Structure formats: structure tokens, C-alpha cells
Amino acid sequence: MEHITTTPFGRRPVTAGLIEQVVAMQAAPEIPHIDKWELLRDLCTARRAFGVTDRDLAVLNALVSFHPNTSLSDNNSLIVFPSNAALSDRAHGMAESTLRRHLAALVHAGLIARHDSPNGKRYARRGADGEIARAFGFDLRPLLQQAARITDAAHQARADQAQLAAAREKLSLLKRDALKLALYGQESALPGDWDALLADLLEVHKLMRRKLDLAELSGLERRTSDILGNIRALLALNTEKMSGNDDDSGRHYQNSKPDNPESELCPERDKGEGGRTDPAEPDRDLPRVPLPLILKACPDILPYCEREPRDWRDLVVAASYVRGMMGISSSAWQDAQEVMGPEVAAVTVACILQRFGAINSPGGYLRALAGKAAVGGFSPGPMVMALLNGTNRAAA
């Protein structure tokens, strides 16, 4: 009977884990035959359950590619013996020292096993018929023996991902309902601490930008549901007051200058650099900073956009949507649009949002900048460039 070596070459010692792996390799696998590429895809999905990284799996993918068959079978030899140079080529030029580190991680995870030759080299001996009689290298049999566990872990990982996506989707819908109802209450001048509610929603939005697990999402969902419940209670209370008195039924608040950028912007405004066809409207230039550069400097505005902004109108709509969450009153926003122009005001709000944590009073800050703009002392260009330079330094 041919002896299959299990002890490592050189200074690597025998460990308890190695002995356990040897014993496990002697058992028959639960799945005796499986497509190797399908198994690798499942392992990529379930890699956290096995404690391996994407780089480890890139090396494993290169190693498996040396197995001549498309499937891993219990009745075939599963030892592959590529040289370091050949393995490096298939691992997209990975350095040999890096290869060794990832190979050790795969052995430690129990996904491959070493069968070292007397001199530690990887090679095969062929018989008189040309078939491989004996090979020294990496054994893929542990991968086959782990196939059932890998498949189950992949199914569980996919289920967890679907549950996480559903929880995040539900939270997004709750946040949207709460935000729009709070903005309605604020714009309608209904009694209630709308600024505090919008500040709470902004905090929820900031937390949602992190990578949250299911428990954290559930906690945030309960918090948002409470905020939404408070908003609906305020709206219901005010509706009862307004509808309970016939004399007051015709006295609902109406804003003579509705905070609706789409109604304020005429289509001709986007046709050129400040070009206007309405002679009653004063000629006003659009911001000189290109819109893509503004979005690069102020990425925090993007989650509030219904789509990737394609023109200034999209940015104005997003700024009008988010300014209430920042505590900027309708009057401050309206004044800024009248003094600066809707486009420059939107750029300014996007810059304030990007620096929100460092600004104590966004509404007061916007009013101060509008006051400077009224006397020709403000341009959003330097704010955008300062943010852009800060982003570039952070990336570097």
C-alpha cells in the first residue's frame, strides 16, 4: 500500500490541528462528487464562516485551476503540484512570499492539505503508461470533504443577506415617510418641534450610512418608527384642530413663496450659462464650478437625490429636500435663493451638509453667506475647492 505523507517538510512542526486534519481526511466525504467552480462560488459567499479572505480565495481559485477535471471526485487523485512561478502566473502575478502566506491560511482553514516530497518540492512521478503514479503538492480533498458545510454556510449567508436587505429597505421607507411628513408639517407652519424631529431623522440617516448588522438595523427601525409615530400624532392633532372649527377651516396656512424649486426654476434656466428667455427675470449666471466637481466634493448630498444629478435643477431639488433636516428654515432657504440664485444656494447647502458636523447653526450660516452674496462678497467656488482638496488629502 502506498504511503501518503502527512508531516510537513522542513522546520514546520506537527500540530494538533494537522493531526485532526489527517484523521478527517480518512473519512468519506458527504458529497463524493461536486462541480469545483460551483463549490468555489459558494465558498466566496460563505468565506467569513471559514475565516478566509478574498485574497486567500484568489489563491485557492488559481490552485484549483490546476486540477484537470471540472469536478472534484472522491475516486480521483486531487493532488495538484504547480510550481511557485506557475501558481503566481495564475494568481495574476502575486509575489511568492504573498502566495506562501495565503497558502498557509488555506491550510489552517482546513480547505487544502500539504503532501510534501522528501525535498519539499512539488512534482509528480509517472508510471510506464504515462499516468501519474505519485504526486507531491497540495491536496484538494479537504475542499471536497468540506463541500456539504460550504454549501450549507453559503445558503445561510444568502438568507442572512436577504434578511439584511429587507430590513434596510423597510428602514429606508420608514425614514422617507417620516421625513416627508415632517417637512410637510414644517412648511405648513403646524405647531410642533419639527426642527428637533428633523434633527433626529438626520441622525438616523447618518447611522444608516454605516455598515450595520441585523440587530443594529432593528434598533434603528424601532427608533425611526417612534419618530414617525410622533410626527403622525402631531399631524393628526393639528388636523383635528383645523377641521373641528368651521370658522377656522378656511384659514389653513399657505406659503406665498412655496419652497418648491421645480416651480421656481423655468426650463430655460438650464439651457445655457445664465441664458434666460423671460425678460422679467434678471440675468443671473449659473455657478462657475462644474456640477460633477461639486458632486465629487459634496458626496453627502447624493443619498437625497432621486437620481444621479444631471443638471442644476436636480441639485436644487435635493438641496430643498435636505435643508429641513439640517435645521435650515424655509425663510432662510427662500432668502438665499432670492439673493444667490437657486443654483448657487443649492451648491452652498450641499457644502454646508458636507461640513455639517463642524457647523453649529446651518441656518444662521446660510443667512450669513447670503448677506455676503448680497454685497458681492461670496462665491461657492472656494468652499467647493476646499472640500475637494480635503477629500483628496484624505484619499491620499
Image (tube, rainbow, N blue to C red):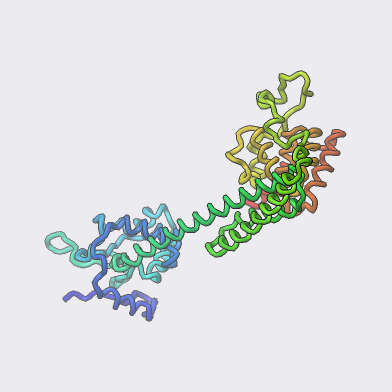
| Viewer-proximal residue among 350 and 239 | 239
Q: Position of residue 234 (x, y in %)?
A: 71, 52
Above or below 203: residue 18: below
Above or below 111: residue 386: above
Above or below 327: residue 64: below
Q: Who's the residue at 65% across and 56% down the image?
A: 229
Q: Who's the residue at 42% across and 53% down the image?
A: 93
Q: Position of residue 306 (x, y in %)?
A: 59, 40
Q: Position of residue 163 (x, y in %)?
A: 47, 58
Q: Who's the residue at 27% across and 57% down the image?
A: 35
Q: Position of residue 279 (x, y in %)?
A: 76, 18
Is residue 25 found left or right of 372 in the rendered image? Answer: left
Q: Farthest residue in the right direction? A: 375
Q: Quadrant of residue 348?
A: top right
| Viewer-proximal residue among 95 and 198 | 198
Is residue 361 found left or right of 198 in the rendered image? Answer: right
Does any portion of residue 137 appear in the rendered image?
no
Q: Quadrant of residue 71?
A: bottom left
